[in-house]
Amino acid sequence: MPELPEVETVRLRLSWHCVGRKIVSNCISSAQFRSPLPMDLDLCDRTLRGVDRHGKLLLLGFDDGSHLLIHLGMTGCFLFGSSRDRQPSTHDHLSLEFGDGTYASFNDRRRFGVITYYSSADSEAFSARLDTLGPDALSSSFDAEYLRSRLHTRNAPIKALLMDQQLVAGIGNIYSCESLFRARISPDRPGRSLSLSEADELIVAIKSTLWRSIALGGATLDDYRGRIGEMGTFDQEFTVFGRGGQPCPGCTCRAGIVQTRCAGRVTYHCPERQH
DNA sequence: CTGATGTCCTGTCGGC
DNA sequence: TGCCGACAGGACATCA
């Protein structure tokens, strides 16, 4: 369940390990993927020019104008190392070998991830794909006015709306729970019921939570424990997520953190503190 | 358009 | 101990 901070951590590692390097071979797994890459895709002789991110999407740009768009899904991660020592895994779906003897491979056990290739001729489709997403949660255009303007007609719970990537890109189950707790807003509140000042507090809570997590390298969850490349410690600072039944860290209420379901997702909040 | 529900996939965990 | 079903997650399709 990598969300914005985890994806940003992966982006930084990809930039560090791969940008400026030329691909000398690539290998695509034949295992069925949700959106299979063409098996004959040949990235040889291309140099990775940069790695960008929008929400939870990684955008790998090559020197010939082509792109790989990667969503990590739940269990997607990148493994790096020396090609000589590489031990291919059954869950490697794409691996890139570079001219300097290093490799990067995309590994995804549950295959919820998505990799899409866009040639330089597909730039319109590439832009169209990105246009389906709302502003990145850390961008300046994601502010209280924008949030209110998008919420004022919506009756769905604010938690579900925060996870809607068309409204704002990058927030998932963990950071919606954590941000709503910090903003003292109940996850069940209809989107339209938020005042401008509440929207403002929510924006501040979301951005500060995301930045704090990035500073700690993201959160490491059970699915990732022990995995190379996922070593963040923000999970140790979770206030509510995964803490059902524990005392509320923000008040002295008797009930403590409550686990419920909101919009089909496990949700954690403090009914005393969040309204 | 909106919101709810089902689907994909696999590893883990609880119950029998 | 061993097996089976339920469940978790994000995005997307489909339905009312």
Image (spheres, coloured by chain):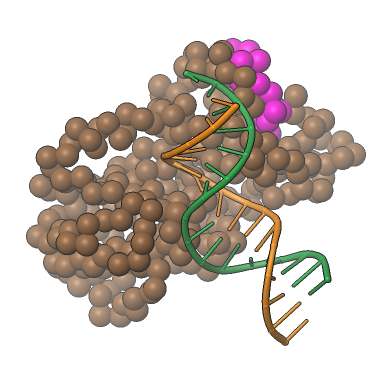
Chain colours: A brown, B green, C orange
Depicted B13 relative to depicted A250: above or below:
below
Does residue A204 appear in this view? no
The reply to whether residue A157 is visible in this rendering is: yes
Is residue A262 on the magenta stretch? no
Q: Is residue A197 above or below residue A10?
A: above
For the magenta stretch, what is the residue range? A180-196
Which residue is located at x 40 percent, y 68 percent? Answer: A91
Asked whether, in this view, residue A8 is left or right of residue A243, the answer is left
Residue at horizontal 75%, vertical 24%? A275
Q: Position of residue A71 (x, y in %)?
A: 38, 48
Foreground of the two, A193 or A32:
A32
- Answer left or right for A243 relative to A155: right
Q: Nearer the viewer, residue C15 or A50?
A: C15
Quick check: A20 above or below A143?
A: below
Query: Picture coordinates of residue A92 (x, y %)?
Result: 36, 67
The picture places residue B6, in percent across and down from the top left corner, at 58, 45
The residue drawn where x is 54% and y is 41% is A172
Q: How many marks?
A: 0
Please give the name of the residue rendered at 50% of the width and 13% of the height, measured from the top-left corner: A149
* Quarter holding residue A26: bottom left
